[in-house]
Amino acid sequence: MKIARVDDVPSGQTRYYTIEDKPVLLANVHGEIVATHGLSPHRLNPLDGATLLDYLLDCPWHHFQYDLRTGENQLPSNVYPAGLPVLKVQVGPLRTYPVEIRDGEVWADLE
């Protein structure tokens, strides 16, 4: 599905879109466009306004952080005690989508 033009997402920034009722976040990491589900797995808040720290996406609501290459939660997962598995439910992964660039446009498989 076509999401946007590559030029719509400057390097080091993110852009939030709703495509056919699906929230999508695009991130430009050093010229590489990455697509993720547009809601934080933590509380399902929109990731509109999320910031990048290299491949680390920082949620604007509670500062949970996700690795854009894998979707894995990096923070607070790395500080939660192993003996409290109830907290692990909050740190599920962020869904990522395959991206293809075609003639300056960003296409992603959102299925």
Image: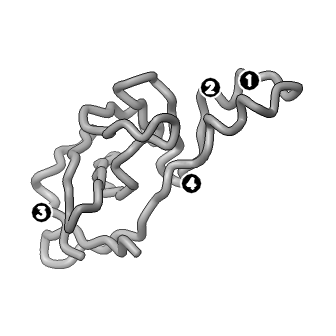
Real-space CA distance between mark 4 and mark 2, rounded to the nearest whole angstrom = 16 Å
Question: Residues under labels 2 and 1: Cα distance?
Answer: 6 Å
> Which residue is depicted at the point 42% across and 65% down?
97
Dot 4 corresponds to which residue?
70
Q: Are dots 4 and 3 in contact, CB under 8 Å?
A: no
The amino acid on which the numbered mark 4 sits, given as a three-letter code, is: Thr
Q: Nearer the viewer, mark 1 or mark 3?
A: 1
- Residue under label 1: 80
Image location of residue 52, percent across then percent down? 36, 34
Report the mark closest to the observer, 3 or 2. Answer: 2
Measuring 20% from the left and 64% from the top, which residue is drawn there? Answer: 19
Instruction: Give percent across and percent down for residue 87.
Output: 71, 29
Q: Real-space Cα distance between discs 4 and 3?
A: 23 Å
Label 2 sits on residue = 76
What is the C-alpha distance between the residues marked 1 and 3? 39 Å
Q: Quadrant of residue 74?
A: top right
Residue to which mark 3 is pinned = 5
